[in-house]
Amino acid sequence: MIEIALLGPPAATDSSGRELGALTSDPKRFALLGYLVISARESATLSEVLAGMFWPAVGRDAARRALRSALFQLRETIGERALVADETDALFVDPAQVTSDVAKFEAAVADGRFELATELYRGELLADTPTDSFGDEFAKWLTRERTRLRASALRAALGMVERAEQAGDIVAASYWAHQGCALSPDDEGLLQRAMALHFAAADRGGALRLYDSFARHVSIRFGTMPSAKSAALAAEIRAAPPPERAR
């Protein structure tokens, strides 16, 4: 079984734990493998479609040659049986031969194993992939998948917030709320919740840093300021005496 890491920095290992640098050395070839691994759960993809998605700037024949070369090199590393072509010339990766952290991450979220899910989510899908030379269809797919997986990571982080609060562990709750803010930087309601938790955990500085970071974010992205409610909460935290240090 070959395992590839698609969330955050790319990585690939074989069943003995040996790193497969040949899989990660070419960003486009690794992105192609990642696309096939993730899409395998939905349907196989026609070779001609793949050629257009990954080599849009060249003619059809050149794109097909580039795809054939990439597939040959992939098979050299992952094995002939791992990459399957059906009678319609559609391609898919056999999940019994190649698995990914995406599959483990989604299973962890679905099962409520939120702490494991947050460990597996090391960053965005194919984070180090330069997509300038890819086709529009691949860019749309990547944006859609990144959004979906980030939402799942946020669900896991908020699940950890709830569990920490129920256990009375305010420090842990503030930590997970902070992680949630990083995953959903536009969510002002989550910002306010995280600020309140940081202050309750005797971390006034952390609460105010979150507010200042959010203020910079909305100023740069939207040309606006935080809401009056968020500003009032920040002012209240600045003025209030520090609470007893949380345990």
Image (spheres, helix red, strand yellow):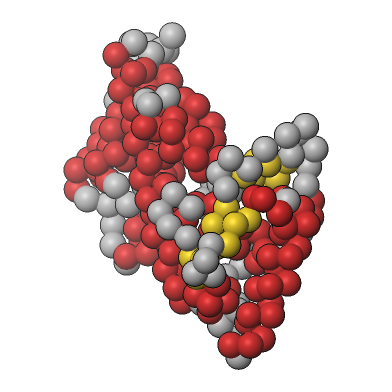
Give the answer, above or below, for where 101 lies relative to 202. Answer: below
Residue drawn 63% across the image and 88% down it: 61
Front residue of 168 and 43: 43
Residue drawn 40% across the image and 32% down it: 109
Residue 33 is situated, as x and y percent measured from the top left of the image, at 61, 57
Residue 133 shows in this picture: yes
Residue 168 is situated, as x and y percent measured from the top left of the image, at 33, 11
Splitting the image into 4 quarters, where does residue 28 fall? bottom right
Residue 68 is situated, as x and y percent measured from the top left of the image, at 68, 73
Q: Is residue 52 left or right of residue 106?
A: right
Q: Is residue 139 left or right of residue 221?
A: right
Front residue of 85 and 99: 85
Residue drawn 29% across the image and 47% down it: 187
Residue 149 is situated, as x and y percent measured from the top left of the image, at 42, 47
Q: Is residue 221 left or right of residue 33?
A: left
Of the 4 image quadrants, the one containing the N terminus is top right
Splitting the image into 4 quarters, where does residue 58 fall? bottom right
Front residue of 35 and 244: 35
